[in-house]
Amino acid sequence: MGPLLTIAADLVDRGHDVLFCTGRRFAGQVRSAGCRFEPVAPEADFDDRAMEVAFPAFAQVRVGPPMHAFFWRVFVDAVPAQSQQMSDITAAFGPSAIIHDTVYLGAAPLVLADPDRRAGRPRVIGIGVLPPVLLSDDTAPFGPGDPYLDGEEGRERNRRLNASAREDYAELQEHAEKVFRSLNVDLPDFIFTSAVVIPDDFLQLTVPGFEYPRPSAPPSFRVIGALPRVLHEPYGEPDWWPRLTGGPVVMVTQGTLANEDLTDLILPTVQALAGSGITVVAVTSRPDGPAELAGLLGDVPPNAILAGYVPFERLLPHCDVMVTNGGYGGVNTALRHGVPVIVGGDSEDKPEVAARVTWSGTGVDLRTGTPSAPAVGAAVRAVLDDPGYRRRATALSGQYAEHDPLSSVAGLVAQDG
């Protein structure tokens, strides 16, 4: 939601008429950005903060391939309703472009039914808000975070792992093909790959230094840098803001999705740094987060700041390290500011993000979503004591500065505007 809202607000500022189709709970944010709000089709609208309510089986899903298959089944099952809605919006609103995130598949049938745009359909632009999911000999398959391996040895390993992935997700693939056939179109490839290759353009929100070499990627795929995190509402500096000067500052966050249990990463980080000369800012991203964290701690260490929502764009320039569960957007934002990262996450796309942190030399992978306090403390000291992490993160920040992702998107829209 965040990346697309940033893109939409920028297009509005450039004079475009933007209709934003998403869940009803985001209506206020969409309108605040100057967009028209269109609620997503009821069949595809659910509150992602309470997955077990809409999908009771989710409570029993294991981390790893079963969880990936579950989520992709949700994405695929939404396609008929989404596709009909996209057709209706195209007829009524007449957009010159449709912009969607990696796993929104509702525009795919429009492309597959008219791949050369001879019938005048809108340009379809995919935005890579996750590490790339397409299978190729260039890399291991998306999911477990297997390290990058170069050369023929790597390509052979990748072929083997990709074949296994196709077997692991064979049931999902069969279901996806059936759903798309019901809409009178055929998937061109494995469902993960199709999500990337179907759009006319696929723009990955990162830089070459944080993404594995992909010489066999289609021409439509390119990296465009990381989006700025635009503040859609005013943010007043809290009374603890002056404490961000005078010594090392470590920010810890579990992002906006996997922050239900603050004991996963935030609590052990605050405990690990208690009594040190390091200021630790615990960003819970929840209004009730600070009070809950204070209760878990008992006595709040004097060097700890317990916060709810804090804009990364405002906080990161004051930080020396970010400890995170590995959200793709958050990690790219930290590196855009030249801040090295420590990743402790094992769900969704987080193992893939952590593997790229290791590969790029910009931080430490704790290899678990529930690290101990001593493990976090040792990682923080390692990153602070070794200037190589900061140097590499600073070098990557230079790559981000060379890219203008908002202009890249706007340029494609203008071609058909």
Image: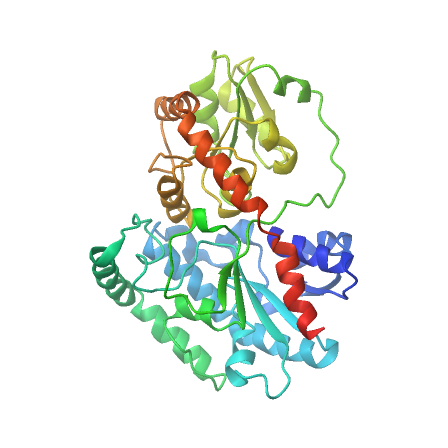
Quadrant position of the C terminus in the picture: bottom right
In the depicted structure, whether residue 327 falls above or below residue 166: above
Quarter where residue 313 is shown: top right
Horizontal relation, residue 43 to residue 38: left or right: left
Could you tell me residue 268's position as x and y percent? 43, 25
Left or right side of 208 for 289: right
Query: Residue 283: x, y in percent?
Result: 57, 31
Question: Residue visible at 59% across and 27% down?
Answer: 290
Q: Quadrant of residue 191?
A: bottom left
Query: Does 401 sit left or right of 381 as displayed?
Result: right
The number of numbered badges drawn on the structure is: 0
Quarter of the image where the N terminus is located: bottom right
Report if residue 259 is visible in the image: no
Q: Which quadrant holds residue 366?
A: top left
Residue at (70% x, 69% y) in the render:
414
Q: Position of residue 137 (x, y in %)?
A: 29, 63
Q: Residue at x 30, y 47 (%)?
A: 147
Frontmost residue, 284 versus 288: 284
Looking at the picture, tell me which residue is in the foreground, 253 or 128: 128
Q: Name the side, left or right, on which 262 lies relative to 69.
A: right
- In the rendered image, residue 358, in percent from the top left (x then y), is placed at 36, 40
Please indicate, yes or no, whether residue 57 appears anywhere in the rendered image. yes
Between 161 and 405, the residue placed more toward the observer is: 405
Q: Nearer the viewer, residue 37 or 215?
A: 215
Structure colour scheme: rainbow
Whether 273 is drawn above or below 169: the answer is above
